[in-house]
């Protein structure tokens, strides 16, 4: 994967344990979404098959491949100031989520090959530094990727930090599978939090333009407002400036009104065509 096909992550600026509550109140100036919202009929993104589709869609943009399970071993510094970027969701040594991943892996399997790097990961957190890491770390990361416990640790942290908060917030906003994916892809790229360039900030900007379905708004109108707000943020940073994952992927599904994100799906990212037929 080259730097054109990857994006950075912002620092995780809020306590991860309270992300769902934080996201639920991110719409500044608007009433909070009801605690329980009945989403229209359709299978949600947390269905196993739909979740796999979501992972393939993200991987097409992040890794130029639909084979997201091949990315457990991925690691490189893409020059975005966030240190190493690695794994199925782009955990970064400079933003805290890689540190938490390795800590979780060590909780599950003490003495694993990456456990010895925890002190170094703590020191480089918040910077682009490779101090105490370097080639030995990248080699050990690739070696650890064949360990099913490490794979599970990556899955766990993906769900805890990104997938579950995004899907839960989308359901609270009355969004079906497509909207849930749009939220998920945004939180993967921009991170959780309430800053203007984070997921919460993007959602707040969208809610100033349109009501969520839970507020009585039209689903397509709101999702278009969300994608518009996201593009504004993406264009502010060079690493995010290619908006094709919005323009020729998510907007394609939205224009087709495929709110349940049902295959067959055809899209392009960075000009490359992809499809999921079943």
Image (cartoon, helix red, strand yellow):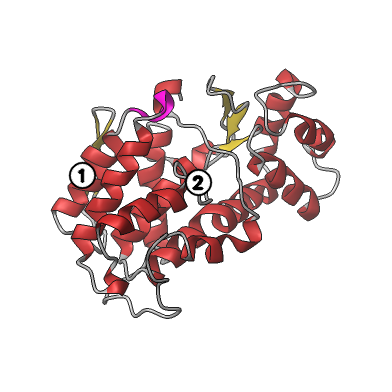
**Residue 2 in sight in this render:** no
Q: Residue at x 71, y 34 (%)?
A: 125
| Closer-to-camera residue (162/105) | 162
Residue 104, image x, y percentages: 73, 51
Secondary structure of the residue carrying tag 1 is strand
- Quadrant position of residue 128: top right
| Closer-to-camera residue (147/186) | 186
Q: Is residue 184 above or below residue 165?
A: above
Q: CA distance from mark 2 to mark 1?
A: 33 Å
Q: Residue at x 68, y 25 (%)?
A: 138
Secondary structure of the residue carrying tag 2 is loop
* Image side of residue 148 versus residue 166, left or right: right
* Image side of residue 187 versus residue 276, left or right: right
Badge count: 2
What residue occupies the far left of the structure in this picture?
256
Q: Earlier in the sequence, mark 2 or mark 1?
A: 2
Range of residues picked out in magenta: 237-241
| Majority secondary structure of magenta residues | helix
Q: Is residue 117 above or below residue 195?
A: above
Question: Mark on residue 199?
Answer: none
Q: Which residue is mark 1?
A: 266
Q: Residue at x 65, y 61 (%)?
A: 17
Residue 45, image x, y percentages: 38, 63
Q: Which residue is mark 2?
A: 195
């Amino acid at each position: 994967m080259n730097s054109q096909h990857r994006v950075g992550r912002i620092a995780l600026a809020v306590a991860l344990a309270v992300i769902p509550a934080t996201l639920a109140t991110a719409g500044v100036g608007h009433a909070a979404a009801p605690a329980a919202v009945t989403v229209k009929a359709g299978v949600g993104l947390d269905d196993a098959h739909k979740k796999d589709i979501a992972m393939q869609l993200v991987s097409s943009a992040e890794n130029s491949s639909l084979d997201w399970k091949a990315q457990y071993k991925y690691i490189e510094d893409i020059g975005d100031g966030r240190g190493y970027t690695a794994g199925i969701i782009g955990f970064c040594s400079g933003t805290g989520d890689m540190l938490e991943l390795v800590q979780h892996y060590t909780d599950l399997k003490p003495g694993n090959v990456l456990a010895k790097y925890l002190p170094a990961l703590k020191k480089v957190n918040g910077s682009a530094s490779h101090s105490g890491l370097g080639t030995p770390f990248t080699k050990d990361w690739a070696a650890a990727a064949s360990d099913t416990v490490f794979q599970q640790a990556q899955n766990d942290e993906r769900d805890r930090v990104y997938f579950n908060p995004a899907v839960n917030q989308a359901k609270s906003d009355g969004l079906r599978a497509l909207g849930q994916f749009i939220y998920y892809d945004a939180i993967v790229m921009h991170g959780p939090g309430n800053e203007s360039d984070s997921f919460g900030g993007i959602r707040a900007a969208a809610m100033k333009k349109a009501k969520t379905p839970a507020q009585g708004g039209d689903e397509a109108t709101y999702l278009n407002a969300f994608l518009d707000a996201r593009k504004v943020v993406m264009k502010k940073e060079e690493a995010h400036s290619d908006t094709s994952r919005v323009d020729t992927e998510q907007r394609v599904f939205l224009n087709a009104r495929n709110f349940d994100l049902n295959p067959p799906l055809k899209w392009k990212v960075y000009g490359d065509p992809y499809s999921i037929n079943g």
